[in-house]
Amino acid sequence: MPTIGVVRSTMQQTHSTATSTTATRTTTIRQILIVYVPFGVLQQNILLTLSGNLSGSVFQKKRKMQLSLFDIPKPKVELEELFNAYFECRKNKRNTANALVFEIDYENNLVQLCKDINDGTYQIGRSIAFIVDKPVKREIFAADFRDRVVHHLVIGKLNHLFEKQFIYDSYSCRTGKGTHFGIGRIDKFIRQCSKNYTKDCYVLKLDLQGFFMSINKNILYTKLENFIKAKYHAPNKDLIIKLCMQLIFNDPTKNCIIKGNKTDWNDLPQAKSLFYSNPNCGLPIGNLTSQVFANFYMDIFDHFIKHELRIRYYGRYVDDFVIVHESKEYLKKLISKLSQYLQTELQVTIHPKKIYLQHYSKGVKFLGTVILPNRIYIANRTKGNFYNAIEAQNKITRDQKPSKEEQQAFQSSMNSYLGIMKHYKTYKLRKEMIFKNLSGWWWNYVYLSGGIAKFKMKTKTI
């Protein structure tokens, strides 16, 4: 397929050498647009630009007549929208193998992707399956980069509608929110409910068992389809619904690429693997659409808590949710009511071994921290994971000089932990963990900035 530059060049040559009749010029331009630029609005923009230079031609007539002459259909997905989705997608994935291959010829790749989506031939590619151990052991399915662009396209279309629908206190995968925001909100709930730690109140924390693997695709799709039909009013509504259906019902376990060893799955509970999920159940962890759609899936439960039960102090991050109330007995009775609702409406189950109900003074673990009166600590598991991450990086320098990729991986790993810890009173902890445990060889390549808040790469290394 010709590149955008070829289209521009061809258009310029056609216009500069046009000496035939208006009808001939019109036919020639139309043919070029149909062959090279099969996207309605882009065609219209080019035609309207040319109309200012072809005096005395049919282009001087009213715009409505101009467009009707060519019978140009409105586009389903704009090429510009895919470019925007691509630039968003590559922000955090630019160094991956799939992203690099796509980027070599990204303009033509995006033009072809746009054509495939609009003519209904788009198919989802193979995923890469692997296991990660931190912060907890999980199964990840990484979609092909081309499909990730589609994920960003769809979420970009729907996210502003989701934001209007979601309650204030759902924290996952939302701009301006996230883990630190959620931790701060739960801390605030406890202070408010206890009247600044002067009265009794209790904290109920619940977790869903195998949440992502339990999501019922039929329930999710039905709710999402109805939501889009009611809230989304763009002309390409049917196409967005079709893309959502493809993304939801795609089974990434079919024909996937296994990265690592199959033995990596040996001690992973079956409830946490798509390979063992029930038919038409489960979303792959690792995709943007999975994260946002999971939040949408739980939205009905959020509204049940806030508007039907009228619970004031409630917050949720993915499948972890916390309720603060002055009555312990009320919270005890609430557990069975919530369990019944979740099972009936969403077919998900509260984890029986992860039910926590205590007085606020005992503290509550939430998103890698322990929230106590007047202070928030980093949880021991987070400390242990940070130590293990340092040890893993030290092994790299024992036998060889780290490559550029390994240096970048070191920076990314260390800064992810420092990024969490710097929000709390952990200066002494960070200092001790790094200077006591990090191999001296790494200081040839990196240095700390911002008061032990971030690792940066040296411009010249030994």
Image: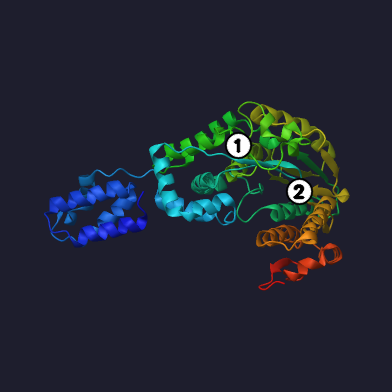
Spot the residue most to the bottom: 460
The crowd level at tag 1 (other Cα within 10 Å; few <14, some 14-19, many 20+) is: some
Q: Amino acid at mark 2?
A: Pro
Residue beneath disc 2: 135
Q: Which mark is residue 313?
A: none
Residue toward you, 268 or 103: 103
Residue 118 in picture, x, y percent from top left: 39, 41
Q: Can residue 51 be seen here?
A: no
Q: Earlier in the sequence, mark 2 or mark 1?
A: 2
Circle 1 sits in a helix, a strand or a loop, which is it?
A: loop
- Between the residue at mark 2 and the residue at mark 1, the CA separation in whole angstroms equals 24 Å
The crowd level at tag 2 (other Cα within 10 Å; few <14, some 14-19, many 20+) is: few
Spot the residue most to the right: 362
Quadrant the C terminus occupies: bottom right
Q: Amino acid at mark 1?
A: Cys
Spot the residue most to the front: 399
- Vertical placement of 412 versus 71: above or below? below
Residue beneath disc 1: 256
- Vertical placement of 262 versus 409: above or below? above
Circle 2 sits in a helix, a strand or a loop, which is it?
A: loop
Q: Residue at x 18, y 51 (%)?
A: 26
Looking at the rendering, which quadrant does residue 126 occupy? top right
- Vertical placement of 64 versus 418: above or below? above
